[in-house]
Amino acid sequence: MKKNIILVLGIVTAFLVSACVDKFAVGDAFLEKAPGVDVNIDTVFTSAEYTRNFLWSAYGQLYCTYTSGNMMNGAPIDVLSDSYHCYCGWGGPIQSYYPGLLTEDAQDTEDGNFQGKFSYSTKYGGLGSDAGGRVSIYETVRKCWQIIENIDRVPDMSDSEKSRLRGEAYTIMASRYFDAFRSFGGLCLARKAYPVGEHFTGGRSTAWQTVEFIDSLIVCAINEPGYIWNIADADQGRWSGRLTRASARALRAKVWMFAASPLFNDSEPYRNYDAGKETEFTNIEHVWFGKKDPALWTRCLQACNDFFQDNAANGDYYRLIQPATNDEIGYRTAYRRAYRYRNNETNHEKLFDAHPTLTLSDGGWGWGWRGFALDCLRQGGAVPTNELMECFGMADGRNFPYADIYGPGKNPQGIDMFADRDPRLYETILVPRQSLPAGFDYAGQTYTDIWVGGMMDKNSNFNNKDDIASGYCKFKWLLDYYGGNRYDDEYIGVPYIRLAEMYLIRAEARAETGDLKGALDDIHVVRSRVGLGRLETMNPGLNLTSNKENLIDEILRERNCEIGAECGDRVYDMIRRKRADLFTKRLHEIRIYRLDENGNRMTEGDLQWDPTTPWPKFEYEKPDIKVGARVWWDQGVSGFDTKWYLDPVSRVEVQKKYGLTQNPGW
């Protein structure tokens, strides 16, 4: 059985009546069976109800950055990017990635202290604590193939519903392969559900074979005649989050965006194997397409156009949520509804999302949303960097203009660099604010004094100082963590893809194929939602109508502002674009100093602000991050080991000798 890549798993399904407010509560609950019910493969396909619940259990295994099985022992993968940093001494990043100590064994820990950003291992077959909440992609793949291969046996299900469920299964399976593809490259491709005793002998496929296989699964989904374009508004309360043909079309565009990028699609591989590391199975095309093919961007653009054309043919059902008022409250509310909450009768922006469970053991660790909050906020598991703050521009659409403002005497006017900014900044990071709009307060505060000596200073006794370890505090997703349960005020849907990203994917594909004007138009659709002026108009020095390289950089920046901290996209953008400059760029904290009436820094005593007095003036420092300093920062671009673009494959899996190879450099 050593060569059997597909772990033979017990068939577990759920026969569950959900609460009417959350009938599609995929997750742990659907992985339990009713008392007294024995389930096997024959049982599952004797009933439409059983078959549906079996598919729901596969939904519970969709990728979500903020569930414990996808976090590096308490930190989401965003902390490998330049936007967030992990300050947890026990966290996976500070133990493995940051000091450069990650090994091929990182995926095979059974004590819950998972170190890698993604698991290739086939050994984990469930959601138990021994597996740290992880699920092998091959468990999900096996379930999906079993549905596809057996659903015609179900006696009490219509042909149209069988077709719809096949479409959903194909899409789930394609998404799980894509999750692994962008972390490892070429994969072992299972083209059926392997029965007990049959060994997988196909070995590892090339990167090109893998992306084409993923695409073929998506095409199968799209071509299912019963696969509907959208969930009817009347059914959103029950079925929000179910995949649709729109989900499949959007996934196809995202897959080709990654494939067309330089990581695999270049004239040279991102890294060669070290001498003596080759084996009988080694093939550099496991991690390289073998050439640079600009036409792949045309494939990405076509996938985008197919989506938008299909959406138009269906009455433009999917639309960006627009602000009710053209002010900060309106802009932030629209943005929050877009990224945070599930689709409903008026919210049609989510194309593909995951539904994390809201609680586990009344807010304990694990798969629950509150478990994530405890990890990432209170323990310093994901703290914003100054680089993320600078990513956001001004409220009028200009890019951040204060690059030279840091240091003693560098801000003689006492400029408040946090005033009049892109509203998405305030929804992403807690920064000093003179007044907080109604409903947007924090811990009961009507203002935020995040400066040295202020109540919310990281060196003060404000709640838990780890959540503001860099001098900034994370706000996106968590909202007012200390304000009771307001962060759980509605059912959450964590985006895998939403409509705003589709515009940005098409913008990148248009830019790469020479249509810079079209790219700028797509960017503006997203930016205008929060009141920003046209990018090229407000930043004329970048020459964005003619300078493709600058435009690509701006698209990556805009992606970080719009979809950062949603699906790990920032770190994968850095990887697929081979941005060694971003990986090796030293990251910074912030120190904000309140100035007295003579322009001197106030550093002693209680420096809280009296709201009856004018808002203070400030000076700023941006010290290097030292806790968990990343080994990459000392290497520079020329010394950076590009092995870090892809993760190491599980040593246990390689040693099974079914043809799986290690990635270069590991």
Image (cartoon, rainbow, N blue to C red):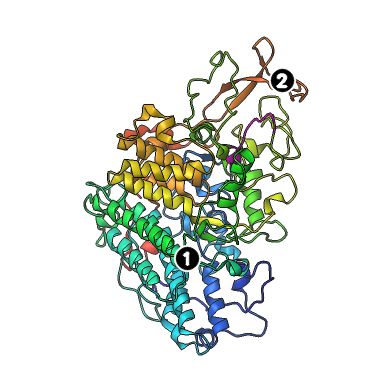
Residue 62 position in % (x across, y down): 51, 63
Label 1 sits on a secondary structure element that is loop
Residue 537 position in % (x across, y down): 41, 32
In magenta segment, residue 219: no
Position of residue 379 relative to residue 310, above or below, is above
Q: Amino acid at mark 2?
A: Pro
Question: Residue at horizontal 60%, vertical 62%?
Answer: 345
Question: Residue at horizontal 30%, vertical 58%?
Answer: 207
Where does the N terminus fall, quadrant-wise? Answer: bottom left
Specify the farthest residue to the top: 598
> Which dot marks residue 20?
none
Tally of numbered tags: 2
Locate residue 584: give its quadrant. Answer: top left
Q: Amino acid at mark 1?
A: Ser
Residue 230 position in % (x across, y down): 50, 66
In magenta segment, residue 432: yes
The residue segment tinted magenta is: 426-435
> Does label 1 or label 2 sit earlier along the sequence?
1
Dot 2 corresponds to which residue? 614
Position of residue 35 relative to residue 370, above or below, is below
103 or 536: nearer the viewer: 536
Dot 1 corresponds to which residue? 136
Position of residue 429 relative to residue 341, above or below, is above
